Amino acid sequence: MKFLVQYGPATAGLIIALIFVLLQRNKRVELPKQVRLLTVLSQLVATSFYIIAYATRSWPGWQLPLPIPSDPDGHLYYQAFVHMLPLSLTIVVLVFLILPIPTAGPPGSAALAPRGFQTFTSRRWITTPGVLILGSTLIAFIAGLASSPDEQGRYVAYFLRASEVSGAGTGIYGWWFSVPSLLLMGGLVVVAFLGVSVISRPALASDTEADSKMRTIRIRNILTVCSGGLLLHLATVFSSLAGTSALKAWFNTGDQTFTYAASFSSLGQVLRAGALTCLVLGLACWWAVLVSALTAKSSTINQTVAP
């Protein structure tokens, strides 16, 4: 049972990734050796760190040692760390996926002019992280508007008033959590856009077909890593909101007891299922990039342009 709780989602994500890569086995994947090395190392470190962090917080006991204050507010900083971890890891991985930057060959051929942003990818691959960003932003604003300040003025509380003299309160993914996450999402978008741009724009090498395939794979890896990080972030948000939805308050009039629940209490099970689904799919995206890079063949692209 402990293994299923801690490592079940990661195992399920790995199985999905292996099936996906197996179905793509007829499409030969080739990457330069340096690109493969940077992709494997960065994605392996990020995926392993996230799995360990999730395992340590999903089962009572040892927790990942973090430089977080041990004061009464330490749990708030830990929750902020949980929300921001997948986005931070994604940005770090994206930096390594951009390297090395393709170099353009000598100028002088119109056919080898710099390419556009969508030359090596399709709208479908761009739409997925775009929808996830919009969804994450919308949820952040809705939860932020529903949050209330605590004693220190931090928007992390959700109050349910049963009457003027009774009620209940709990934590919520409020502005204190969502604003840093929104800033990280903005940074993720900037880094991803720059990565896709710098890989797409240099002129193609003399072996245009191989160079085009290589750039397509690199850009697809960038977008897949982005989608995975956003899904993992949504998993933490849905899990937090599921906990908030369980809040209830009672009001006793003497003759009758009234029960009040959060306005979105009926979504509790949906939010929990959504959190687990996003967790598994997010890890599947990261696993897919890692497995694909591990099984890819090393290639050497001749950067000399054809006359």
Image (tube, helix red, strand yellow):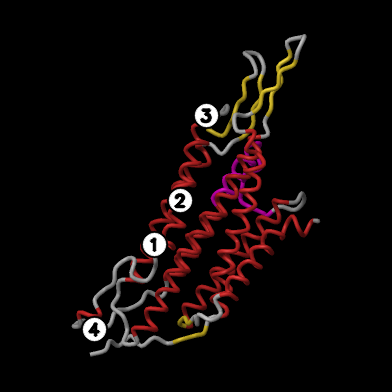
Task: Classify the position of the N terminus by image quarter.
Answer: bottom right
Cβ–Cβ under 8 Å for marks 4 and 1: no
Task: Determine which of the numbered discs, if any, sits on residue 133 in the image.
Answer: 2
**Image position, residue 193 (x, y; %):** 37, 61
Q: Mark 4 points at which residue?
A: 106
Asked whether residue 252 is drawn in magenta, I would say no
Marks 1 and 3, how far apart at CA: 43 Å
Q: Is mark 4 on a helix, strand or loop?
A: loop
Vertical side of 218 occupied by 67: above or below: above
Give the amino acid at mark 2: Ile
Which of the two discs, 2 and 1, labels the residue nearer the N terminus? 1
Marks 4 and 3, how far apart at CA: 59 Å
- Region in magenta: 64-84
Cβ–Cβ under 8 Å for marks 4 and 2: no
Position of 302 with respect to 307 (left or right) is right
Q: Name the residue under label 1.
A: 123
Which residue is pictured at 76% across the width and 49% down the height? Answer: 60
Give the amino acid at mark 3: Gly
Vertical side of 110 occupied by 70: above or below: above
Give the amino acid at mark 1: Arg
Which residue is pictured at 59% across the width and 69% down the height? Answer: 44
Task: Classify the position of the C terminus by image quarter.
Answer: bottom left
Vertical side of 118 occupied by 156: above or below: above
- Crowding around mark 2 (Cα neighbors within 10 Å: few <14, some 14 to 19, many 20+) is many
Give the amino acid at mark 4: Pro
Closest to the observer, 53 or 25: 25
Marks 4 and 2, how far apart at CA: 38 Å
